[in-house]
Image: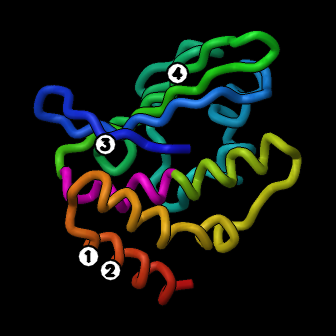
Amino acid sequence: MNGKLETVGEQTVLRFERRLDHSIERVWKAIADPEELCHWFPQGEPLEVTESEPPRLLTGTWYGDVLRFELRPDGEGSVLVFTHAFAEREKSARDAAGWDSCFRRFDALLAGEPMSESDSLESWPDAHERYAESFGVDPQLGRDAFAAHQAQS
């Protein structure tokens, strides 16, 4: 997935959009079912659902930020639009690389081959540097966060 950075009012918004070869119902289950969510969604703070319109829309807060999952059918598959809105633009590369890793695990779950968090993080440093350059943000915040995460593992 390639994240894009947008500004909406006072908010910085990461936006990921992609077509999936899975039905909207299957993708919804991976997003909304806690037993599936735990296979790909970041550990720590749970997603606090604020709006749910199965199987098309799920919105919630996570660490005070707003996450939004929108689904629409597309032939025999579906399209997922994921947005993450936050106030601190400086964390955009860190978070985009993090979502890349999460969505690698999401794809693996949908394929029936769950992936470990450590395997999903192998590409994190390269993705982070690419996002930091693309978004024009200082990469040090993400580098420090990744090093701290690795030290805890």
- Which of disc 4 and disc 2 is earlier in sequence? 4
Q: Disc 2 vs disc 4: Cβ atoms closer than 8 Å?
A: no
Q: What type is the residue that disc 4 sits on?
A: Glu
Against 54, residue 18 (above or below) is below
| Left or right of residue 34: residue 61 | left
Q: Which residue is mark 3?
A: 65
- Which of disc 3 and disc 1 is earlier in sequence? 3
Q: Residue at x 62, y 22 (%)?
A: 79
Locate the C terminus and report the quarter of the image it occupies: bottom right
Task: Characterize the local packing of mark 1: few (<14), some (14-19) or many (20 or more) Cα atoms within 10 angstroms.
Answer: some
Query: Predominant secondary structure in magenta?
Result: helix
Task: Characterize the local packing of mark 2: few (<14), some (14-19) or many (20 or more) Cα atoms within 10 angstroms.
Answer: few
- Which of disc 3 and disc 4 is earlier in sequence? 3
Q: What type is the residue that disc 3 sits on?
A: Asp
Q: Which residue is mark 1?
A: 140
Q: What type is the residue that disc 1 sits on?
A: Gln
Q: Which residue is mark 2?
A: 144
Mark toward the viewer: 1 or 3: 1
Q: Which residue is mark 4?
A: 70
108 drawn magenta: no
Task: Characterize the local packing of mark 3: few (<14), some (14-19) or many (20 or more) Cα atoms within 10 angstroms.
Answer: some
| Left or right of residue 14: residue 49 | right
Q: What type is the residue that disc 2 sits on?
A: Asp
Against 97, residue 17 (above or below) is above
Against 126, residue 10 (above or below) is above
- Give how far apart the Cα atoms at labels 4 and 1 are: 32 Å
Find the magenta span and give its range. Answer: 89-99
